[in-house]
């Protein structure tokens, strides 16, 4: 056989193969073609055998042509096989149980979520949002709130001191004073923010925590309004069957001062472990703004009355989500953050 | 404050359950935090002998015992491992009531009947031990007798009440009894004083001189002679035990008893140690020191008040007595002090010396200046009764300026105006009278305030008393109706929420960390001075963070140590530092990105490692979403690697930085991966965003796209080329995108090829080649000229 004959054979084989491949519709037909052309006794193998009949000086070029043919056929078979496989997957074997491709999204911290809910509820009742510094003067944190120097009430909260006259605010109540100094009644604000106390961390204490303070001042504001606002808040956040209870207590900047409780969210008031059998969970303090506080900011206590209340955001979040350890909020473990 | 129920019942006659009393106290502001029972609290328990112990047929851990009670033999199933025949044990028979109100009834345990229970120590309230039954000493207990504990206390209930600092009058049993009497409207029985005095006049025995009348408005004393110091009687021990006070001897116990009864602190001196039989109340001298009876030596200052005799100090006024004059077993004569000290003065000294005692706590909140004599007489009477003392005739009472009761006018209309209530004058008057506040008149009601209520000084205080006793539940909640028309909108809050929304939409999880960090974290940048806390809880929380970024690095390492290294985190919080000697705090947002993008398709392996461009893209898209033009320029910053660090500015004001966190820093946190981060201030952005985005009409004419590639020096910053293209392209060139960077065979080795896609558009017409070509030429010329660039054809 001459070199030219062989090359012609190669071209012929390629053409025949392409026609045959075109009509092959499934994996079996393709496999049959592979055996027919590339198998041990296939036609390409036959052509390789005939290589020995070609004069040695022309053998190299012919060999190259043959190798090229083998590669071409193999590539074409592989490609067709992949196509057929994909068609089968998409038409006959589409697996809807495969996990979807998640878009990349993040989560808000649970404290942010709860703060947003609280802001929303109070916003609907006409309360705006105010803020103030966290490194606060003793005047705003204590004196102006009727907690004078040398008063035993200063011991009610363990304070972290910065320097002469400055502390890390122990509550967001200083924002009350700052707001009243800059605005005249009527006013309705809440002030969410970070607070600091010298409490050893445990499951229910954190030296840094978040508080929302509320303040409402106008002519004719009464304790009945305070009860109405707290009741509305409790029912919007925890459900319409939630009841509120006020107990007398003492906070120097409000009088009458009270602590307020909500129906236990776990047992809905029946009495359980969480509420120690009382049916109530303690939320925080509230009361009518003490006239002495109005005097500090230059409001006429005879003309204006007002109420103030506070609440710990972590406490609310723990009740809402069933979180049992306050420290989880600040560890920022991704397994925690991704639950909300 | 611990309040014993037995003790309380000495002064009031009430028939009410423990739980009900606790709930009522809580509802008038005396919050009962805990209720405990003390002493033996069981009945129906007898001594028995175990005759035989057999295995329970149906339970491995139970035994069936035959127990002889002398007249009868009981079949009792027991679970204790130590039970054995021959033991003498305490048997709770059917009908017995054990600790915690647990009643014994006939029972069937796994099919075997049981008639009683063999007691462990816990069931009898002796200890918490519950593992084994209590084996009794056969020599001390007789089978069949009722079981009782040796020296057992009378059963009692103790309330732990949280007394708020405004109510010093409730730091005593009589004070709490007065509240209970008010709640139930029953009389309060204050013990009568009945004193037999000797003929020896007290004036001949002691001389008192107050040098600081402001610090000590009243000082009174009695002398009691020939006392016999001994053990206290059982009832007195029980009272003190119930409130957690250790019994010492009859005289000391009586002063403590009267303190807990009346709330008025007393002090007993050994009369024979009082030099010159003189008492002088004066301020300490500079550098004077004093040893209190707990053997602590205190260095004093001139603000501290001392009780002295003719030679030396013998007590730290209102806080603690001295070792040199304390009651000992050999004491025969007693000088009994009852005084009233200035609250502020006592508080100052107690705070400074870190000495908080039962006495100082009461004086600093305000004792009753007119309760001095009652307490003195009450103690003297008890010392005569229980220590055989002879009370000398009369009292020395130094009270130069009497502190009188004052009165406060209450306007009934104001009460209802503040409370939103509709209480009648009768209700108000009734509340006052129940609280031992006498009233005259109806409008206003003039209320006389006894000196034991220092908290009642203003009308509002009495308004509080009305609702405190009458009940907050008598006020009907009202919905706020009028909406104040004030500028309540806080745009900064809205702006911060937009930032948060951007981040969660971009796959970042929000973190919240404590603002308190260790010193090494606060000092991460040498030129930023941290604010340190004077009295930190621990070195871990000694400073306020100067940046948010270090907290996020802590979160990276926390999660890395829990096998999660692929993280996108952000936090909004305040940076704190000292600037020009002032405390500075500013809201900032920081974000970190580290590891690989593992959210994509999990069956492909082309997960991409986050890099500098990832964080830069986040910054750029944040800027775009907020509609604020932030500029990023090359700027070295100590937080980032030199090569990968940029500054962020807004209107030429630097507001933050971005880059690849410096290896030296991530090593300090032990972070294994590269971290890319930024931190920017929020206020400059929210201030700049006052204008709303203005709508631009959608283009009516098609845009034209042209690609340009330049060969430039390989060190040239791409950002500079883009700036030049934008400048020279003018308004018509609406967008420039980099789409390829090429280094390779086709161009010299010190060069790179940068290819840009340019968009041209006009709002007025369709652009033609004639218009665009000259612009292209202009751009090409400008780039070539600026950077010695060559256009690739």
Image (cartoon, grey):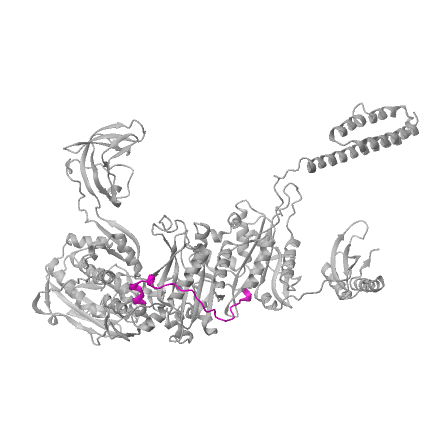
Dividing the picture into quadrants, the one containing residue B413 is bottom left
Answer yes or no: is residue A59 visible.
yes
Residue B92 percent across, percent down from the top left: 21, 38
Front position in the image: B620 or B787: B620
Label tally: 0
Answer yes or no: is residue B312 visible.
no
Is B775 on the left-hand or right-hand side of A328?
right
Front position in the image: B16 or A299: B16
Residue A270 percent across, percent down from the top left: 36, 49
- Which quarter shows the C terminus of chain B? bottom right
Q: Residue at x 65, y 53 (%)?
A: B614
Dividing the picture into quadrants, the one containing residue A311 is bottom left
Residue B512 to residue A63: above or below: below
Q: Residue furthest left?
A: B199
In the rendered image, residue B777 lying in the magenta stretch gets the answer no
Is B740 on the left-hand or right-hand side of B448?
right
Dividing the picture into quadrants, the one containing residue B617 is bottom right
- Which quarter shows the N terminus of chain B? bottom left
Residue B670 percent across, percent down from the top left: 55, 49
Front position in the image: B302 or B240: B240
Residue B421 percent across, percent down from the top left: 34, 67
Front position in the image: A320 or B535: A320
In the rendered image, residue B485 lying in the magenta stretch gets the answer yes
Residue range in magenta is B464-492
């Amino acid at each position: 056989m001459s070199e030219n004959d062989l090359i012609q054979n190669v071209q012929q084989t390629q053409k025949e193969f392409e026609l045959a491949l075109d009509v092959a519709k499934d994996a079996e037909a393709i496999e049959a073609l592979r055996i027919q052309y590339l198998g041990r006794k296939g036609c390409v193998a036959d052509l390789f055998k005939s290589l020995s009949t070609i004069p040695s000086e022309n053998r190299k070029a012919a060999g190259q042509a043959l190798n090229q043919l083998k590669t071409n056929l193999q590539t074409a078979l592989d490609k067709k096989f992949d196509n057929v496989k994909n068609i089968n997957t998409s038409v006959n074997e589409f697996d809807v149980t495969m996990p979807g491709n998640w878009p990349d999204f993040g989560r808000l911290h649970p404290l942010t979520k709860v703060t947003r809910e609280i802001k929303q509820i109070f916003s609907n009742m006409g309360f705006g949002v105010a803020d103030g510094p966290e490194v606060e003067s003793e005047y705003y944190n204590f004196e102006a709130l009727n907690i004078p120097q040398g008063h035993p009430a200063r011991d009610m909260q363990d304070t972290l001191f910065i320097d002469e006259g400055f502390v890390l605010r122990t509550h967001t109540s200083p924002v009350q004073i700052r707001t009243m100094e800059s605005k005249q009644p009527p006013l309705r604000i809440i002030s969410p923010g970070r607070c600091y106390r010298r409490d050893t961390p445990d499951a229910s204490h954190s030296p840094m925590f978040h508080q929302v303070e509320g303040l409402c001042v106008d002519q004719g504001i009464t304790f009945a309004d305070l009860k109405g606002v707290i009741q509305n808040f409790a029912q919007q956040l925890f459900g319409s069957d939630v009841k509120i209870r006020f107990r007398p207590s003492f906070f120097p900047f409000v009088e009458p001062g009270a602590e307020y409780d909500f129906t236990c969210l776990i047992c809905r008031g029946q009495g359980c472990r969480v509420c120690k059998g009382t049916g109530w969970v303690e939320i925080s303090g509230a009361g009518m703004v003490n006239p002495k506080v109005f005097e500090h900011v230059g409001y006429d206590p005879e003309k204006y009355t007002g109420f103030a209340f506070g609440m710990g955001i972590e406490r609310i979040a723990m009740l809402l989500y069933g979180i049992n350890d306050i420290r989880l909020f600040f560890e920022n473990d991704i397994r925690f953050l991704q639950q909300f | 404050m611990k309040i014993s129920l037995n003790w309380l019942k000495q002064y009031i006659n009430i028939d009410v359950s423990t739980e009900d009393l606790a709930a009522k106290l809580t509802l008038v502001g005396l919050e009962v935090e805990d209720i405990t029972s003390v002493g033996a609290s069981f009945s129906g328990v007898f001594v028995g002998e175990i005759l035989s112990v057999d295995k329970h047929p149906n339970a491995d851990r139970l035994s069936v015992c035959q127990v002889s009670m002398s007249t009868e033999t009981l079949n009792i199933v027991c679970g204790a491992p130590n039970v054995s025949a021959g033991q003498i044990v305490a048997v709770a028979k059917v009908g017995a009531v054990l600790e915690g109100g647990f009643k014994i009834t006939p029972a069937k345990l796994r099919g075997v009947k049981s008639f009683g229970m063999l007691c462990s120590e816990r069931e009898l309230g002796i200890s918490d031990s519950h593992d084994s039954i209590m084996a009794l000493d056969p020599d001390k207990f007789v089978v069949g007798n009722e079981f009782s504990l040796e020296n057992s206390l009378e059963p009692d209930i103790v309330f732990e009440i949280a007394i708020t600092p405004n109510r010093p009058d409730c730091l005593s049993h009589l004070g709490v009894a007065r509240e209970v009497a008010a709640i139930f409207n029953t009389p309060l029985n204050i013990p009568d004083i009945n004193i037999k005095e000797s003929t020896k006049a007290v004036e001949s025995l002691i001389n008192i001189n107050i040098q600081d009348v402001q610090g000590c408005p009243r000082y009174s004393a009695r002398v009691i002679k020939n006392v016999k110091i001994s053990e206290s009687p059982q009832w007195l021990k029980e009272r003190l035990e119930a409130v957690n006070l250790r019994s010492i001897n009859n005289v000391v116990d009586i002063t403590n008893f009267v303190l807990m009864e009346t709330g008025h602190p007393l002090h007993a001196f050994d009369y024979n140690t009082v030099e010159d039989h003189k008492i002088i109340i004066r301020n300490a001298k500079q550098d004077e020191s004093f040893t209190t009876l707990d053997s602590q030596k205190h260095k004093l200052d001139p603000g501290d008040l001392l009780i002295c005799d003719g030679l030396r100090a013998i007590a730290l006024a209102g806080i603690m007595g001295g070792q040199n004059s304390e009651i000992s077993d050999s004491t025969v004569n007693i000088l009994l002090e009852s005084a009233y000290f200035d609250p502020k003065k006592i508080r100052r000294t107690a705070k400074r010396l870190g000495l908080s005692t039962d006495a100082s706590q009461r004086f600093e909140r305000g004792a009753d200046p007119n309760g001095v004599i009652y307490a003195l007489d009450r103690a003297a009477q008890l010392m005569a009764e229980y220590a055989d003392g002879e009370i000398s005739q009369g009292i020395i009472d130094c009270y130069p300026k009497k502190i009188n009761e004052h009165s406060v006018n209450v306007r009934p209309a104001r009460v209802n105006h503040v409370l939103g209530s509709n209480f009648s004058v009768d209700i108000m008057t009734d509340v006052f009278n129940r609280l031992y506040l006498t009233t005259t008149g109806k409008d206003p009601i003039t209320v006389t305030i006894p000196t034991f209520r220092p908290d009642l000084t203003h009308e509002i205080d009495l308004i509080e008393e009305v609702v405190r006793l009458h009940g907050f539940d008598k006020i009907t909640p009202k919905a706020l109706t009028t909406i104040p028309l004030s500028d309540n909108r806080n745009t900064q809050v809205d702006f911060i929420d937009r930032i948060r929304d951007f981040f969660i939409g971009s796959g970042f999880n929000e973190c919240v960390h404590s603002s308190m960090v260790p010193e090494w974290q606060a000092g991460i940048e040498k030129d930023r001075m941290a604010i340190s806390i004077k009295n930190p809880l621990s070195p871990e929380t000694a400073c306020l963070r100067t940046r948010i970024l270090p907290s996020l690095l802590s979160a990276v390492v926390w999660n890395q140590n829990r096998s999660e290294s692929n993280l996108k985190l952000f936090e909004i919080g305040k940076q704190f530092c000292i600037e020009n000697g002032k405390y500075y705090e500013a809201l900032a947002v920081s974000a970190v990105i580290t590891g690989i993008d593992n959210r994509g398709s999990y069956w492909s392996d082309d997960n991409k490692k986050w890099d500098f461009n990832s964080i830069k893209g986040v910054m750029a898209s944040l800027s775009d979403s907020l509609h604020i033009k932030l500029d990023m320029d090359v700027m070295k910053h100590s937080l980032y690697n030199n090569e990968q660090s940029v500054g962020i500015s807004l209107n030429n004001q630097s507001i933050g930085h971005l880059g690849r966190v410096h290896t030296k820093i991530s090593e300090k946190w032990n972070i294994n991966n590269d971290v890319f981060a930024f931190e920017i201030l929020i206020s400059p952005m929210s201030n700049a965003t006052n204008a709303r985005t203005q709508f631009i009409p959608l283009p009516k004419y098609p845009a034209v796209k042209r690609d340009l590639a330049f060969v430039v020096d390989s060190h040239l910053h791409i950002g500079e080329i883009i700036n030049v293209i934008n400048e020279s392209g003018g308004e018509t060139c609406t967008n420039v995108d980099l789409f390829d960077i090429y280094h390779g065979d086709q161009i010299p080795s010190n060069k790179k090829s940068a290819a840009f896609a340019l968009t041209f558009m006009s709002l007025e017409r369709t652009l033609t080649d004639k218009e665009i070509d000259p612009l292209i030429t202009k751009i090409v010329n400008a780039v070539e000229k600026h950077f010695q660039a060559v256009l690739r054809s």
